[in-house]
Each structure stands twice: as C-alpha cells, then as structure tokens.
Image: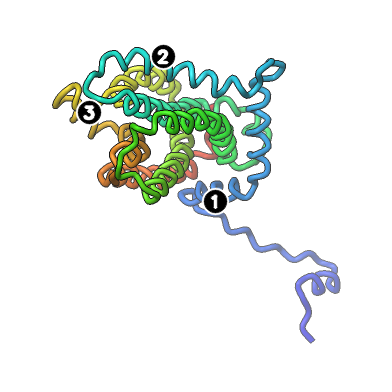
C-alpha cells in the first residue's frame, strides 16, 4: 500500500519540505495579470457602475446629463461647421461630425484616463495585491456606460438625418461597425496600461500628452474632410492613427465600403499594442508601487 505525502508526514512526525512554487517569468506575468483581472469581472463591473452613479450624486437630472452634454457639444460644432460647407448635404455633414465626435471622445477619454491610471489608484496598489488590469477594466467600463448614453444621441441623429447615409449601406456594414466598436474598446485597454506605466515613471509625459491632445483634435478629421484642405490633409489623414479608428466606424455608414487600409492599421496597433503593454506590465509591475 502506498502512502501519500501527508500520511508519511503524520507517521514520521516530521514536516517534509514543500517544493518551491514555479514563478511566472516576468515577461509573461503581465498576461497572467490580464487573465486574472478578466476573471474578476464582477468586481470591476460593480466599481464602474458605482463610479458613474457617484459622478452625478444629488443632481436633479442624474445620468441624463451625459447625453445632454454630448448633444450640446455636437450641436455647436454642427451649427458652426455646417456654415462652412456648401458642397455636401446637411444630413451628411451632421452624421459625419456626430459620429466623428463620438469616436474621438471615446478614444481621448480612454487615453487621458490612462495617463493617471496607476497614480490615481496608488492606495489600492500599495495596500492590496489585486491584478493591475482591474483598474483599466473598471475605467474602460465606466466610460462604456457613459458612451452608451451618447450612442442614444447618435442613433437619433442617424434616424433624423438618414438621407446622409450611403445608398450602399447594408447589414454587412452594420456588422463591420459593431466590430469596429469592439476593436476600439479592446485597444483602449492596452493604451491605458501602457501609458499608465509610462506616466507613473515619467510624470512629464502626462503633461506632454495632455498638451498634444488639444493639437491632435485639429489634426484629426473629426469635423473636416481631407478634400476640403488639400494634399497636406491627405498626409495627416494617413499618418494620424486616430483617423483610422474613426474611419472604421464612419466609412461603412457614410461611404458604404470597407476601409481596408484603416482596418490594417487598427489591426497592427491592436496586436503590437497589447503585446507591448502586457510585457511592459510584467517587467515593471513590482516597481510601479514605488513610482506612485
């Protein structure tokens, strides 16, 4: 009869040495953190909802402020910019600006939140051992709740100004638009992790990016079209990564075709970005608590 390790320990009265745990290589521990964070989805979902509700605590309109504020911002841009465009229909201009502004806000809010992702959660990081990815998942989910209310305004604009939709628009384009939104959310996660680490180590980067964002808005075709400006705008259009994230959503609706180049750019950023972010997290995870 064979005895187990526990039984041999009881009989002999001596504790046998336990084999050392096999540590995950640092270069892979970021991916482990990602998986552990995903498994604790109930935690970051509840925290995200609590953050959103607390933002409008004791206000009369509550969450209605989210779509109302977005509607106000878009309306101002539409009223001003529409007067400068004579070659296109009003419906198309409204949809162009509304969708562009929605995706721009999703991207920029995700980026700016990521700049202070770890510094703003310093107490949690120093007092607990929860996966770092939870902070990104929570912040991204909070913004998704917020932008789902923005989407109500966008859906209303699409219905009211449907004459601006391309004649070639069909169910396939709807599927590509849905896939594009998923791609944007997936990218926001790695952006927050990557820049959260960089800004925790080099605080000047946070202020530098914050300043560049104001310039990037005017370099991104949110309210203007490249054909209105010329060759220089075409160059910006191709080199600016924000452009491609907007185009994978907007082009199927307004132009009725698949933006192949933009999808290739987004795909490359998705793969390279995630690999870079999670490897960087694995290599620096033990240092972040000292940086913040």
Residue 172 located left or right of residue 2: left
Circle nearer the viewer, 1 or 2: 2
* Mark 1 → mark 3, Cα distance in angstroms: 38 Å
Kindly tell me whether residue 229 is visible in this rendering. Answer: yes
For the point 39% across and 42% down, which residue is it?
273
In front of the other: 95 or 243: 95
Q: Residues within 10 Å of mark 2 (few under 14, many from 20)?
A: few
Dot 3: few (<14), some (14–19), or many (≥20) neighbours within 10 Å? some
**For discs 1 and 3, the disc positioned in front in the rendered view:** 3
Circle count: 3
Position above or below: 90 against 33: above
Cα distance in 3D space between marks 3 and 2 = 25 Å
Q: Which residue is tagged 1? A: 32
Element type where label 1 sits in the image = helix
Mark 3 or mark 2: whose residue is earlier in sequence: 2
Q: Quadrant of the C terminus?
A: top right
What separation in Å lies between label 1 and label 2 (alpha carbons)? 45 Å
Which residue appears farthest toward the left when viewing the image?
Answer: 231
- Quadrant for residue 149, please give it: top right
In the image, residue 85 lies at what x, y percent?
25, 18
Vertical placement of 112 versus 269: above or below?
A: above
Which sits in the foreground, 41 or 29? Answer: 41
Q: Which residue is depicted at the point 70% across and 62% down?
A: 18
Q: Which mark is residue 76?
A: 2
Q: Give the answer, above or below, for where 236 lies relative to 180.
A: above
Q: Give the mark toward the camera: 3 or 2.
A: 2
Using the image as rendered, state which of residue 163 and residue 13 is in the foreground. Answer: 163
Could you tell me residue 210's position as x and y percent? Answer: 41, 19
Q: Which residue is tagged 3?
A: 236
Q: Percent x, y for residue 162?
A: 39, 33
């Amino acid at each position: 009869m064979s005895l187990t390790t526990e039984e041999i320990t009881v009989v002999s009265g001596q504790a046998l040495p336990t084999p050392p745990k096999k540590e995950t290589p640092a270069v892979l521990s970021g991916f482990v953190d990602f998986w552990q964070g995903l498994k604790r989805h109930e935690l970051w979902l509840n925290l995200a909802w609590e953050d959103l509700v607390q933002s409008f605590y004791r206000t009369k309109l509550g969450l209605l402020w989210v779509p109302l504020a977005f509607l106000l911002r878009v309306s101002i841009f539409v009223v001003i910019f529409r007067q400068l465009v004579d070659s296109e229909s009003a419906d198309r201009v409204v949809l162009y600006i509304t969708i562009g502004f929605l995706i721009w806000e999703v991207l920029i809010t995700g980026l700016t939140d990521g700049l202070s992702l770890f510094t703003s959660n310093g107490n949690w990081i120093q007092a607990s051992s929860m996966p770092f990815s939870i902070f990104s998942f929570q912040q991204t989910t909070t913004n998704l709740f917020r932008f789902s209310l923005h989407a109500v305004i966008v859906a209303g604009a699409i219905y009211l100004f449907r004459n601006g939709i391309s004649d070639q628009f069909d169910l396939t384009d709807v599927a590509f638009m849905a896939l594009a939104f998923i791609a944007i959310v997936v990218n926001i996660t790695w952006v927050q992790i990557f820049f959260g680490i960089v800004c925790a180590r080099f605080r000047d980067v946070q202020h530098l990016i914050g300043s560049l964002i104001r310039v990037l808005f005017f370099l991104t075709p949110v309210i203007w079209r490249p054909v209105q400006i010329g060759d220089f705008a075409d160059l910006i259009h191709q080199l600016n990564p924000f452009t491609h994230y907007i185009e994978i959503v907007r082009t199927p609706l307004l132009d009725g075709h698949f933006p192949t180049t933009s999808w290739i750019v987004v795909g490359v950023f998705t793969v390279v970005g995630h690999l870079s972010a999670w490897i960087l997290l694995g290599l620096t995870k033990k240092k972040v608590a000292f940086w913040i």
